[in-house]
Image: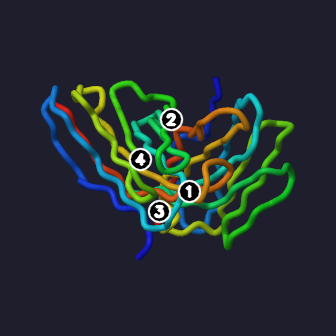
Amino acid sequence: IAGITQAPTSQILAAGRRMTLRCTQDMRHNAMYWYRQDLGLGLRLIHYSNTAGTTGKGEVPDGYSVSRANTDDFPLTLASAVPSQTSVYFCASSVQYGNQPQHFGDGTRLSIL
Amino acid sequence: EDKVVQSPLSLVVHEGDTVTLNCSYEVTNFRSLLWYKQEKKAPTFLFMLTSSGIEKKSGRLSSILDKKELSSILNITATQTGDSAIYLCAVRDNYGQNFVFGPGTRLSVLP
């Protein structure tokens, strides 16, 4: 079934550790996105990628990095996790960046202790 | 700074009721407004609205945009327990790189 796969589903991590959240899509979408969802704040964009080889910063990029080596994969890395990064992380994609609906993965629940 | 506000933040109704969810926005140069439904995990796309006054409809759900009032409503008629979810509103402007999401409305439909 075509769609977006995120891994892991959930993770508990000690503060200061490095963590990479994985995201893979098989829809050949050009644009991909990473959001975090926190209670009362809705979804906030962390980083995005218009197409393979390019990335950009969203609303809350500090403490996170991304790469887009190919069309399908868009990993999100926390170089040194802090408790404020405890959240649910959603990866999304769309055919093109812009005025199109996004398809979301099922999310990764990350707890930083 | 772009901003999206949704109301109410939570709502409890009984099956068969009709509900109206509200979304208002402040965007520098509006391009589109989107509604999503989020049950347990991934948000799923419902509607995208770009023009004022044109109703989008899908089954018991409908939505309309009012650019003059900088707002949109999402109507659900004859609600069912399966409509229980968080309904998210998002807007996009022409210059920003963000889809800006509102906090969502949590709808609970009781049998």
Mark pair 2, 1: CA separation:
15 Å
Vertical position of residue B84 compared to residue A18: above or below: below
Coordinates of residue A64 in the picture (x, y in percent): 35, 32
List x then y, in percent, for residue B60.
67, 70
Which chain is disc 2 placed on?
A: A
- The residue closer to the viewer here, A9 or A55, is A55
Tell me the distance, in whole angstroms, between the alpha carbons under discs 2 and 3.
43 Å
Q: Residue at x 51, y 53 (%)?
A: B107
| Disc ID at residue A68 | 4
Q: Which residue is mark 3?
A: B110
Secondary structure under tag 4 reads loop
Q: Identify the amino acid type marked 2.
A: Gly
Q: Are marks 4 and 3 on the same chain?
A: no
Q: Give yes or no for contact between labels 1 and 4 (Cβ–Cβ under 8 Å).
A: no
Q: Image quarter for residue A20?
A: top left
Q: Which residue is mark 1?
A: A94
Give the label, 1 or 4, closer to the camera. Answer: 4
| Residue drawn 50% across the image and 44% down it | A49
The image position of residue A95, as x and y in percent, is: 59, 59
**Distance in Å between CA atoms under marks 4 and 2:** 11 Å
Viewer-nearest of discs 1 and 3: 1
Instruction: Give whichever of B110, A27 is nearer the camera.
Output: A27
Amino acid at circle 3:
Leu
Mark 1 falls within which chain?
Answer: A
| Crowding at mark 1 (Cα within 10 Å: few <14, some 14-19, many 20+) | many
Which residue is painted at 69% across and 34% down in the image? Answer: B25
Q: Are marks 4 and 2 on the same chain?
A: yes
Colour style of the rendered protein structure: rainbow
